[in-house]
Amino acid sequence: MLETLGAKLKPGGAWQAFGTVDEACWDSSPPQPVVSKDDFIVTVSAGMRLDDLQAHLEPFGLALPFVPIVPSPGRRLGEWIGQNVPHQLEGTFRSWRDWVLGGTMLLSDGSVARSGARVTKSVAGFDAHQLPIGTHGTLVVPVELHLRVVAASRVAWPAPVQHSGPFWIQRVLRTDFEAACQQSGLLWSDPETATCALSQRPGFCPEHSWWMDERGVGPLSPLQRETWLRAKAQFDPDGRLAGVPE
Amino acid sequence: MLTGDAVRWGAAVDRAYDCDAYTVDRSAPAAVVLPSTEQEVQAVVRWCVASRVPFTPRGAGTGLSGGAMPALGGVVISTKRLNRILEVDLPNQRLHAEAGVTNSALSKAVAHAGLHFAPDPSSQTVSTLGGNIAENSGGPHTLKYGVTAPHILTVRVVSPNGEMQEFGRRVVGGPGPAWERLVVGSEGLLGVVVSAWVHLTPVPKAVQTVLVALPTIRAASDAVASVIASGIVPAALEMMDRNILMALKVAFGLEFPADTAALLLLECDGEPKQVEEDFARMLAILKGFAPLELRVASDEAERKSLWTARKKGIGAMGRLAPTIVTHDGVIPPSTLPDMLEFVYAVAAREGIGVANLFHAGDGNLHPCFYFDDRDPKQVESVVRAGEEIMRKCLELGGSLTGEHGIGVEKVGLMHAMFGPEDMALQRRVKELFNPDTLCNPCKLIPDQKGCVEHMVRWRGVAT
């Protein structure tokens, strides 16, 4: 079953969810997405590259309204979800937490479990399909995703920011946005979400704000981290998946 | 701890708190407590844990799946007295409120600044923020604005073992897991919500509303599917069938064109230019289905008038029978035409009345059965019909529930939607936050220890 879903077990028996593209666990030729054009839903392998998904949706007049701040060609959906970094259209279309309607996940014990549904609205059970989002493959490995997409005609595609090297993304309260934009190394900013991208680590960090690097790693609250570690022990007791970032 | 009228018990309390708005299953509490502070909630939870007494959080009791029913008795923790808005931050479009504040009070508090709390369940004048969070409530405008989850920044909970915890950030998003997204929609199993920071949404600059009368259910459901497939995202797309219209006429004297089989209420909102374009396209689509009447609101007063039918529909149902049970299932909108025919066929076979008033745009059905719950045979028919409809939703690729939750009503159907490995994952999520059996037992997860034998008892007292 896993092979048909596009997942592979790494040599040595560990599920490697993330890392470089070459190290990713997903098959390089995952099954074709299943598009429900009239319902604006696509079911897709988490191993599919974002660019390939967009190309597949185009003939249907659909799109995933996701534009990375800095382009990262070749990156797979599962990686984007695991890192959950902000993107340029978030103010209008939100992001992965609202687009992932459900899906199939691989657990560290080798079992495959589903959560959510293939409809835009479902509150049946806990939203376990939120587990892969922002958790860097540490708890479960997303295998197949039900994604909400939009009519391509509704998307105004912004130009990506040309930048090489590391960068940081910071979000602040609207009242702190102007000050945040005064920081040196500003690459991009979005007043709608009060978010900016910087070529250096933010030096201005008001109380209610957060930042992350381009991999989606940043400071956590003690409770958030402690719960993540407890979840890690619960979902991956043998440590077969990636470790919780320091 | 709590004294005076903050602790209640006795026959009247049993009757008032033995169910929520899902009245088929009932179980009386040993006592009801009404704490006024989060510290009091924490003290009650700690006492329950130390005394091994089950406890069940409750907001306004408007839930429709039995989520606030004290399934194993014990203590009901009502959050109705946690009713303060703690902080309003207009420049940053956010607000901090206690769990017992009503949904509509949140919007009223910031209306002067052109903001509102977007989730708008039909119960919004009484249902509470805590209840909305527990059920991940939806509403007519969910189609565009989403359910409760994306509007919640933080949730402060008393955990099932009595710890005070705050999940989330006061700014949207951020690195790492978002545990608040698991607490939202967890039906009170992962703790007692005491307060939350919510995100506020600007009131749209332009709104256009139309009420459309159509001659057949098929035409109405085809029209819904066509509007959705066009790529337009209406703010709301609601449908009401002939039986709802009949109840509205009897209860409130509302008149609709003769031969109307279904009404559609559609609304576009947002930036004026976009609204104008979308609304014109939508009207063109609707005209293709030969409507009996197409009434466009010319001003805010007329808009409110067009919404009257939708807002008063459930209330009017009381005229048709002593009891109503509103089911909740989801299908892909493209399958709506076939699904509605199925709903009517099931009700006819079971010999019970059914009316449909629902969120057609996102395929969220609400078959509303009207019957007399003093007749056990009718109760059985309603339960059987509901299950059959839910199974059909699943067959069409949908879900058991779009906004009412699983509660006790559908706990036995979870196996129909999820396999053993899926349910094992659900159990792991519960155990991460709630490894014990005291916090809102017998809900959402089937076959919980000590619950199975009680299911007969709940149903048995539906008199």
Image: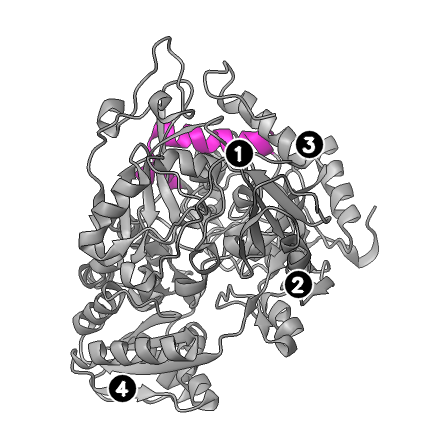
| Dot label at residue B430 | 1
Q: Earlier in the sequence, mark 3 or mark 1?
A: 3
Q: Position of residue B84 (x, y in %)?
A: 73, 63
> Gap between marks 1 and 4, in whole Å?
49 Å
> Gap between marks 3 and 4, in whole Å?
60 Å
Position of B110 with respect to B404 (left or right) is: right
Determine if the magenta segment contains residue A199: no
Amino acid type at circle 3 is Arg
> Gap between marks 4 and 2, in whole Å?
38 Å
Q: Which residue is mark 2?
A: B101
Q: Earlier in the sequence, mark 3 or mark 4?
A: 3
Mark 1 Cα within 10 Å, few/some/many (few <14, many 20+)? some
- Helix, strand or loop at label 1? It is helix
| Dot label at residue B294 | 4
Q: Quadrant of residue A94?
A: bottom left
The residue lying at 20 percent from left, 85 percent from top is B259
| Dot label at residue B154 | none
Q: Position of residue B152 (x, y in %)?
A: 57, 54
Magenta stretch: give its range: B412-437
Q: Quadrant of residue B129?
A: bottom right
Q: Position of residue B132 (x, y in %)?
A: 55, 57
Amino acid type at circle 2 is Val
- Whether callout 2 and callout 3 share a subunit is answered yes
> Gap between marks 1 and 2, in whole Å?
27 Å
